[in-house]
């Protein structure tokens, strides 16, 4: 009877060695923590107050939503400069449908998303099938939809909106337990979310061990997941002491789960990474690269449309200036979160971290009374450092 040889056990590297090979993954997370600690001290505790934490989620929700889509675009080796203008246009269209045409919210929501999808498809068609550089196509889109927003609103603000539309951005999850304050539903959901993430992490580690895949050191794995568990429960408690979980936080969480699953667990996600890594090789291996590129821009258009709805709902009005320079914040967030300029690299978690680095900096500098001129310069320098860090990593590993 033939004996099956057991799989060779792969020893995990030391923590120092592991971190040296995963600087891209953990460097910006550490930067976010240090930035939060810095502003927490400089603002005498204002940064981490419940009302301010809630405002951080509300103020950055639309950037996070677009960063999730922009990550796919940039992983595929492209860029989208039109997202800010699409946000303004879709928000304006929703405002006109709600205020002027008196359409119900249940109809306005899908029509607005379809508009975003159509815009993404129109731009993706020229990029994917006509090989026109994405920079040029989306730059044109930025100008076209900025002008279309001015035309649609006739240079005036349109609002206010029905309460059920405003709830998309400014609403909170109802406490089903009826406790009131602290919001018991927020605490329970936070604990369940933290426990689910811990369970999935343990299951993944066991699976890696079964197949002999090198994993992170146990001490690092344990410490990381304990800190993650504590952080989620803590922020749930902080939010619970104010008004509970914002609706946009639930929206962001759902998007993060879906897009993380697509990127890591599906053939579609792996093919997008292959496309960005080497388009010619991907095409020779049978991947329909044009279709994938088209899909990334359709998806970006849909998420830009969703961000437009969230932003309009938060302001309770649509303005001709809505979405101006949003594309810069979104692109900066994805770069800071570890995406590569050449494509093929980037994680959903990195894009979220990058978005909150920008958000915490904006919020902290505003609390400290730093002028918008200095804020822009500081954010530009942070983006430059992130790009230099990316180039240094690639040179070191090459």
Image (cartoon, rainbow, N blue to C red):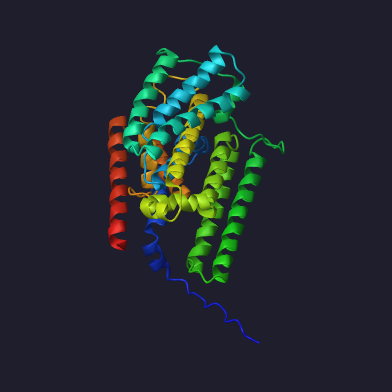
Which of the 4 image quadrants contains residue 246? top right
Q: Is residue 248 left or right of residue 326?
A: right
Q: Position of residue 21 (x, y in %)?
A: 38, 63
Name above or below for residue 14 compared with residue 374. Answer: below
Q: Position of residue 180 (x, y in %)?
A: 67, 35
Can residue 160 be seen at all in this image of the molecule?
no
Q: Is residue 390 left or right of residue 208?
A: left
Name above or below for residue 344 compared with residue 165. Answer: below
Q: Quadrant of the C terminus?
A: bottom left
Residue ranking furthest to the right: 177
Which of the 4 image quadrants contains residue 379? top left
Residue ranking furthest to the bottom: 1
Q: Position of residue 1 (x, y in %)?
A: 66, 87
Q: Is residue 208 left or right of residue 374?
A: right
Q: Position of residue 387 (x, y in %)?
A: 30, 48
Residue lying at 43% horizontally and 71% vertically, measured from the top left:
13
Can residue 398 be seen at all in this image of the molecule?
yes
> Between 133 and 309, which is closer to the camera in this rendering?
133
Residue lying at 52% horizontally and 36% vertically, measured from the top left:
54
Residue lying at 40% horizontally and 15% vertically, measured from the top left:
151
Residue lying at 60% horizontally and 33% vertically, measured from the top left:
172
Q: Is residue 55 left or right of residue 197?
A: left
> Between 84 and 126, which is closer to the camera in this rendering?
126
């Amino acid at each position: 009877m033939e004996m099956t040889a057991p799989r060779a056990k792969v020893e995990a590297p030391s923590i120092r060695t592991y971190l040296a090979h995963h600087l891209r993954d953990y460097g910006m997370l550490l930067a976010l923590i240090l930035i939060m600690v810095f502003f927490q001290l400089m603002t005498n505790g204002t940064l981490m107050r419940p009302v301010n934490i809630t405002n951080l989620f509300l103020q950055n929700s639309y950037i996070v939503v677009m960063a999730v889509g922009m990550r796919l675009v940039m992983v595929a080796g492209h860029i989208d400069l039109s997202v800010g203008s699409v946000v303004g246009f879709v928000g304006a269209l929703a405002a006109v449908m709600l205020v002027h045409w008196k359409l119900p919210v249940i109809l306005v929501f899908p029509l607005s998303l379809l508009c975003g999808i159509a815009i993404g498809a129109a731009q993706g068609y020229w990029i994917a099938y006509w090989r026109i550089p994405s920079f040029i196509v989306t730059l044109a889109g930025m100008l076209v939809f900025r002008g279309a927003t001015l035309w649609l609103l006739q240079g005036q603000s349109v609002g206010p909106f029905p309460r059920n539309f405003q709830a998309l951005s400014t609403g909170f999850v109802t406490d089903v337990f009826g406790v009131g304050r602290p919001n018991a539903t927020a605490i329970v959901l936070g604990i369940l979310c933290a426990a689910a993430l811990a369970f999935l992490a343990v299951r993944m580690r066991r699976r890696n061990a079964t197949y002999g895949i090198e994993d992170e050191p146990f001490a690092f794995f344990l410490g990381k997941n304990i800190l993650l568990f504590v952080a989620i429960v803590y922020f749930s408690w902080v939010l619970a002491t104010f008004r509970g979980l914002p609706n946009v936080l639930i929206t962001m969480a759902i998007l993060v789960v879906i897009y993380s699953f697509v990127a890591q667990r599906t053939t579609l996600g792996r093919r997008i990474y292959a496309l960005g890594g080497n388009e010619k090789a991907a095409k020779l291996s049978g991947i329909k690269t044009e279709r994938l590129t088209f899909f990334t821009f359709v998806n970006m258009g849909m998420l830009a449309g969703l961000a437009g709805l969230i932003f309009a709902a938060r302001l309770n009005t649509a303005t001709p200036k809505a979405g101006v320079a949003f594309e810069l914040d979104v692109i900066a967030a994805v770069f800071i979160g570890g995406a590569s300029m050449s494509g093929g690299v980037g994680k959903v978690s990195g894009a979220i971290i990058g978005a909150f680095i920008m958000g915490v900096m904006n919020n902290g500098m505003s609390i400290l009374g730093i002028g918008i001129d200095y804020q822009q310069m500081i954010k530009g320098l942070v983006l430059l450092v992130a790009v230099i860090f990316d180039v240094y990593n690639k040179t070191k590993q090459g």
